[in-house]
Amino acid sequence: MGNFIKVVVFSLVVIWLYVVFSANYIPPITPAPPPKEEVLDLSEMTMDDFLALGEKIYDGKGTCTLCHNPVMKRAPLLERTAVVAKERLKDPRYRGKAKTVKEYLYESLVDPSAYVAKGYGVTGTNDTVSPMPDVSKGAIGLNEVELWAVVAYMQKLAGVDITVEIPRGEAVAATEEKKEEKEEPARTPQAVLEKYGCSACHKMTEEGMDPGLGPDLSKIGAKRDKEYLRRAIVDPNAEITEGFSPMMPDTYKDQMTAGELELLVEYMAGQK
Amino acid sequence: MQPILRSKRALLLLALTGLVVLFMLMVPAGDGYVLHRTDGLVYAGGGGGGGSEAVSSEGAEAGKVEYPPAPKLKESDYPTISGINSRVFVWLVAQLHLWFAAFVLAVPIFVFIIEAIGMATKDERYDKMAYEFIKVSITAYSITAIFGGLLAISLMVFYPDFMKYLTLIFGDSFIWYALIFFAESACLYIYYYGWNAMKHGFRKWMHLTIGFLLNGVGTTLMLFANAWVTFMMSPEGVDASGVFGGNMWEAIHNHLWNPINLHRFIANVAYGGSVVGAYAAYKFLSATTEEEKAHYDWMGYTANFIAIAALLPLPFAGYWLTAEIYAYSQQMGITLMGGVFAWLFIVQAVLIGALFLSANYYLWCGMERSEGAYRYTPYIKYIGFVIVVCFLVWFTPHTMILTPSELKALGGQYHPILGPLGIMPAKNTAVNIMIIFTFLSFLLYRRANKIPTVSWASFGNGVQIGIFTAAMVNIMILGVYYGYFTNTVYKVASSVPQVVATLMVIVAGVVIDVFMYRGAKEVGPLKWGKMPERSQYALFLLAVSFTWLMGLMGFIRSAIRQHWHVYTVMRDNSVDAFTPTIGYAAKVVSVGTIIFMAIVIFIFWLSHLSGKKQTEYQR
Ligand code: HEM
């Protein structure tokens, strides 16, 4: 028993030392929280706000400084990119479609391989493929407004005239997405129908009126199975019901939660 | 079959495992679950079978199945149970499953090796030890399965939509997994319970073959699980929005699959060795007779030997894995080595340093077993010194970039003096030298009790020293040249010649040694059991550090996906999507380690209990 206790105490002490080391010796860094979709009120936004947004994305969500920093030398510094962009456009190695500086900067973000800065290409590709990801997609996933905000910020960094305009129109998408994120998911099939306004086009119940834009769904469960119904919502244009035009929105797959979709499908399948 | 029926405990275990297997089969195949799975599929016509109505549409390609994109979840899509932190719960269960799985996969690997050695050398001790090991792994096996089942349930409870998505892609492999698991159980039980019935002649060969099968099946099982894990890190076979292309092999054979397969395989062997070493150490400490002491000393030595042999190539497999992570996504690679996790690798370095030092320390203590070793004791302090220096270089923080905004606040500065030691070539150099010196410890240990009789002994020695020196110079020059005088962005590839030099030393060293010490004269008999008690604590240190290290690396593996369930494809929108601090992770890992250790102690106690009964019965 004596040995047993000795061994257990020894092991616990070792573990304790590791914890003390990890929790107290190395600097306590709180990793940045996952990026959030910003609420953008673009109608009110001034250029200063817009640049501030760009800077925030540049340091945060865009993770630009992860690669573009003076320490690791894994990517060129961006302080002068807006200045050298003019030369880049004339370079024979340039393969993009941009005509102006702001277009070049934008293109660098969404199609990094259009021009690959010398020495920074993926090893073995002779600077034809950029290791930089398309920042409008994948893990970074900036939207249109955010991309232009970053471009504007890069122009500010370089101290050149800011030629980017605040994109008032397109931004709505980003704002709307945010609004929805705050909404609670619907808990009943009726609430789902109401939330997504299905009855604007469909007759949904026996008593309901028929707007006539889409097929009558009040007895749909007798005709279609769940698989079909699910697809009809997620990908409405996969098949078009005879006698109707393909006008049902195909955006529900992005808007609905998995739970809502399930509720809806269950409900419709039961409408016989 | 007789012994199986006789042992009640065996029946109990069989029943238990059977239940778990049944459960695992039911889960993916059963109610609700697979329902969702096929429901989730959208048949673009021509599917045949179930969705016949859908077939009617015109122009659809026959037999083509279309899959939905990865779902976009909201915080409220994640079920919660008050009082339970779902992330920590799943985390601990997954890690415990991994620990046991590693142990259960590793033990049969070296039981097989030891059994084969026993057959070749006709040394009964090996066979006895192999049997003792496998006995330990059999209870651990049921526990692995229990944690596996628990993991499956808790994932479905807490992350249902994520599991549905994975099932959509990997559903078929879940069923294979369960079947293979069943096959592994069968092999293991036959291997264990048939041990004494198949002890001699041709039957022994059959037994060894079953051992081989057991390992084949076990490794296959691991490959499946690795596929799911690596798919989450480097998804392939799906498009940017997560729509599955229908080819499961692509998803399995994703970019990081093989690097992780290799790293885990080797790490598991080393890990199994370390746990068995701890078992032997405990038995050694509580042994009452000289005989027992000798047996467990020898067992501890063998287990430690296996652990070190697997430890030596591990850093290389680790660097390959890292290189592949960079190749897959530079962003993920930098997040791993240059971002917040840079500090985590300092903790990793401490742990690995502890592993190397304790393994070496054990070897040095082991020299007391032989009289001839006194010749070598003066050198030990130099070896120790070199290993500590290498450890410190490895320990020196890599690029100290924190988060992008912190970097900005710091103005991009990192440690001005230690900076040069913090870069990759310096670390590569340190690791290689550390490995070579550990090998040197081992060589000294090996020859401690022997005096070569071959005529070319001094020449052989000279050659060894020559190779050793040349390799060291080579490694240093390469490290310095790549590290400080070329202007290229450093490449992990620059370490290849260093690795080659290290491997050369090991291979050449062993080959020369084997020939040189053929028919060597023994200085005195090896005194197994003549080990100081403190040496046994090195074995405990090894096992505890290894367990903790595995937990830590499990955290890193999963944390570098950041706020993604499936990197870039399916976002984690739960409240727990944030990356915790290292201190927090260390605490969770420690709790896991303690639970694991407690269960392991319980297992050893069980096997001790059954051993007791047997002897009483025989009397
Ligand atoms: C002597 C050196 C090393 C040792 C002893 C070691 C040990 C381990 C162990 C025990 C695991 C857990 C395996 C499992 O869960 O099955 C692991 C995983 C891992 N290691 Fe290493 N490792 C070493 C070197 C490295 C290096 C140099 C790197 C990268 C810089 C690295 C990166 C990783 C990663 C990312 C994982 C997670 C993958 C997984 O969960 O399987 N390792 N390592």
Image (spheres, coloured by chain):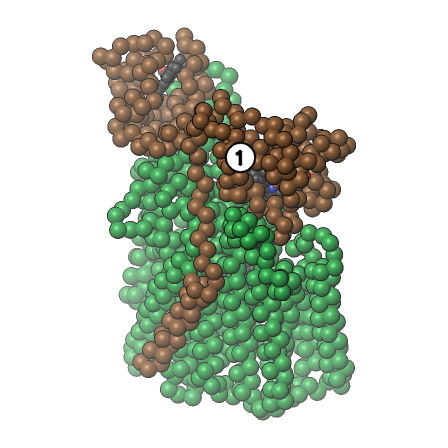
Where is residue B411? Give x, y as percent. 58, 52
B37 versus B177 height, above or below: above
Q: Colour of chain B?
A: green
> Residue shown at 22%/12% (left/top)?
A207
For residue B582, what is the image quadrant?
Answer: bottom left
Q: Is residue B406 visible in the rendered structure shown here?
A: yes
Q: Colour of chain A?
A: brown
Q: Residues within 10 Å of mark 1 (few under 14, many from 20)?
A: many
Where is residue A81? Give x, y as percent. 66, 38
Which of the image's four quarters has the C terminus of chain A? top left
Q: Chain of mark 1?
A: A
B98 versus B252 height, above or below: below
Q: Is residue B173 visible in the rendered structure shown here?
A: no
For residue A129, what is the image quadrant?
Answer: top right
Query: Which residue does the numbered mark 1 point to in the structure image?
Result: A51
Where is residue B205? Give x, y as percent. 52, 66
Amino acid type shown at disc 1:
Leu
B476 or B242: which is nearer to us? B476
> Residue shown at 61%/70% (left/top)?
B390
